[in-house]
Amino acid sequence: MKSRIVILALACLCVPVGASGGPRASAVGTEPSVAVIDVYLNGIEAPATGDYGKAVAKALSGSGYAVLDRDEVATRFRSVLIMPVRRMQEDRLADVERLVRDGDQLVYTDPKAAVEVLNKARSQLESLSDGLSANDRLRDEFLKTQMLLARSHLDSGNEARAGEVLREVLRTFGDDLDVSERDYHPRLVKLFQKVKAGMRADRTASLSVQTPDPGCVVLLDGRPQEGETPREYKNLYPGVHYVQVRCGAGESMVRRVTLGKDKVHLLVDVAFEKALAVDAGRLGLVFDDARTAQARMVPFAAKFGELVGADLVVVQGFLEDGSRSDLKGLMIDTKKGAQVRAASVPARSSVVTPSSVKAMVDLLVSDAGEAGSAASHGAASGTGSGGKAWYQNYYGWILTAVGVGGLAWGGAETAIYLGHRSKAQKAYPAQGALSNADYLAVLLKQNAQMRKEATLANTASTYAIVGYSVGGAALVGGVVLFALTDKIWPGAEAPRAMLLPTVGSGGGGMMLSMPF
């Protein structure tokens, strides 16, 4: 019995008295950092997306968060990843194609507007005409510039500086670079061979490249390497190198890595890096369609947060076409890679509507309470829910289980008690033909058995009382914990009805948004 009582008592002590699982205020200087980025869908016109990102970031900064400046986010991003030249050209070509399509549609409905659109497309095409193969040309220009710089230092008598420039050339272009007197001055060629021989002992760095899907090609400093991922490259020059991965038709960003004594490990997710957009005023993720965006937005945003060093990432943008649609917003915990909050509010996609920004931020932080607790909130879709539901109160379930078990034990012991009591109260037999001595022996034997049964009945009665007492108390405690769930784990403020201004083609008005 003692062991059973101790187990039940320990189960009861699992519930902390006065515990509060709700959000707690952050210590001074520990507000979570937040990066606000955008989401774009190919084919969806939403010119105000970037402006909404700036407005949401500004509004969040007044809600207890350390909001990263968008320019700072872009700078941190570019310190690690560089947009490939080819992709920049492809993105700009896609913009030109869109302008041509728009102009074609306007030719028959608004010729004047068509002229403006097509002129814009033509000017962009002219700016692209000299850069369609810029990647190789940039490498050639870089090599030409470096070699001319080395020759200039050499001619001016600064052989040491010329050697430094040639070492940078070798780190970038590798030992297979052809530098001969056919193209360069003999003194420069001689110095190049001397520097090359001296650098052979420096090739101590190594690089390991992996991809979620194996079989991708690795480009190191613009040169395709032998083999496919996963792959390790040894005997590399220490210093800064540029790594890019190509998987089928997709290519990653160009990653800037610094190699040293320790081997560097890279995990390159081409699908993620293909979706990144940090150019032409954009900052965020680009997807082909809404379905892909819904499936990949959370993990990709979490990876973006890791790149720029943000605790939380807020992704916002339009996933539907139309001059007025819903502005979607997600708050993602970078470390957990999980959605913290979601919201959707009516908004204009062509111009920022302040009421939409305020409604979005209110929904995203409505249950945050204090600045440091955002990562602990439950996901929602603009409903304002938070904390725990009563059925998620595991302490309540533990006490309820203990209570039901205790009552069941008490019931079993009661049955045992009744059985033993019945035997203890059994009537003595009649003497009949037995002699007095034999009858006395029968009575003594039955009396001893009845006393034994009475002892067992008393023990079972004690067990039953303990079971009923502990079980009843635990069951009541469980019910109380269920009833106090909102007090122990405070939820969000109940969603409020909001009156939002709206503008239509026939004038302005007000829209009432009510929770139900």
Image (cartoon, helix red, strand yellow):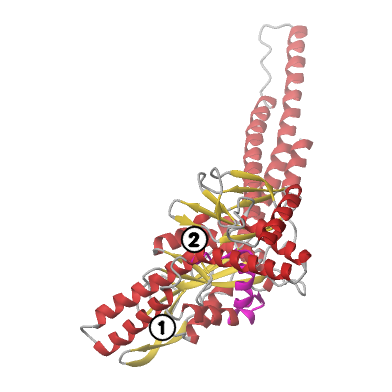
Q: Which residues are magenta?
A: 59-85
Residue at 26% in and 82% down: 106
Q: Is residue 267 above or below residue 308?
A: above
Q: Which mark is residue 350?
A: 1
**Residue 78 colored in magenta in the image:** yes
Q: Amino acid at mark 2?
A: Lys
- Please tell me which of labels 1 and 2 falls first in the chain: 2
The quadrant where residue 434 appears: top right
Residue 259 location (% of width, % of height):
70, 54
**Residue 400 colored in magenta in the image:** no
Q: Residues within 10 Å of mark 2 (few under 14, many from 20)?
A: some
- Residue extending farthest to the left is 108
Residue 92 location (% of width, % of height):
43, 72
Residue 508 located left or right of residue 393: left
Q: Residues within 10 Å of mark 1 (few under 14, many from 20)?
A: some
Q: Amino acid at mark 1?
A: Ser
Q: Tag 1, which secondary structure?
A: loop
Q: Which mark is residue 274?
A: 2
Q: Is residue 106 above or below residue 435?
A: below
Q: Tag 2, which secondary structure?
A: helix
Residue at 68% in and 73% down: 371
Q: Nearer the viewer, residue 288 or 428?
A: 288
Does residue 241 appear anywhere in the picture? no
Residue at 35% in and 80% down: 122
- Residue extending farthest to the bottom is 507
Does residue 118 appear anywhere in the picture? yes
Q: Which mark is residue 425?
A: none
